[in-house]
Amino acid sequence: MQPYLIETFWSEEDQAYLCLAPDLPGCSAAGNTPLDAIREMQDAMSSWLQACSNMGRELPMPLAKPHKAA
């Protein structure tokens, strides 16, 4: 799998950690801990990419870059 950026953050509304992949629209996951959310996200990303491939669509190139702290 390509090295797609995964953004992980706490959601007060959902009372869970959420993950998003900016390069994979609509691909998200949640978990009780950051690690749980990331594991769920890896499964979601695999499913998203497989569905894209099954539909004959070109897989997106990873464009999002991690943020660097100063």
Image (tube, rainbow, N blue to C red):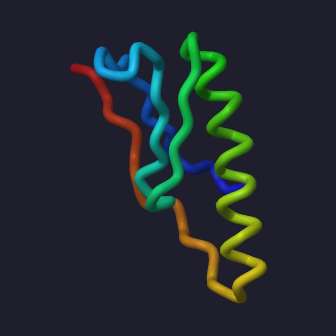
Q: Is residue 63 rendered to the left or right of residue 67?
A: right
Q: Quarter of the image holding residue 13? A: top left
In this rendering, position of residue 38 left or right of residue 46: left
* Percent x, y of residue 58: 63, 83
> What residue sits 41% from the left and 52% below the top?
22
| Image quadrant assignment for residue 38 | top right
In the rendered image, residue 24, in percent from the top left (x then y), is placed at: 50, 59
Which residue is nearer to you in this view: 30 or 41? 30
> Relative to 26, is 68 on the left or the right?
left
- Residue at 71 percent across and 88 percent down: it is 56
Figure check: 62 above or below 3: below
Relative to 63, does residue 31 appear above or below in the rendering? above
List x then y, in percent, for residue 18. 46, 28
Residue positioned 67% across, 56% down in the render = 2
3 vs 11: above or below: below
The residue sitting at 57% across, 11% down in the picture is 33
Relative placement, left or right, of 9 versus 5 is left
Q: Give the total of numbered labels.
A: 0
**Quarter of the image where the N terminus is located:** bottom right
In the displayed orientation, state which residue is furthest to the left: 70
Q: Position of residue 69 (x, y in %)?
A: 27, 22
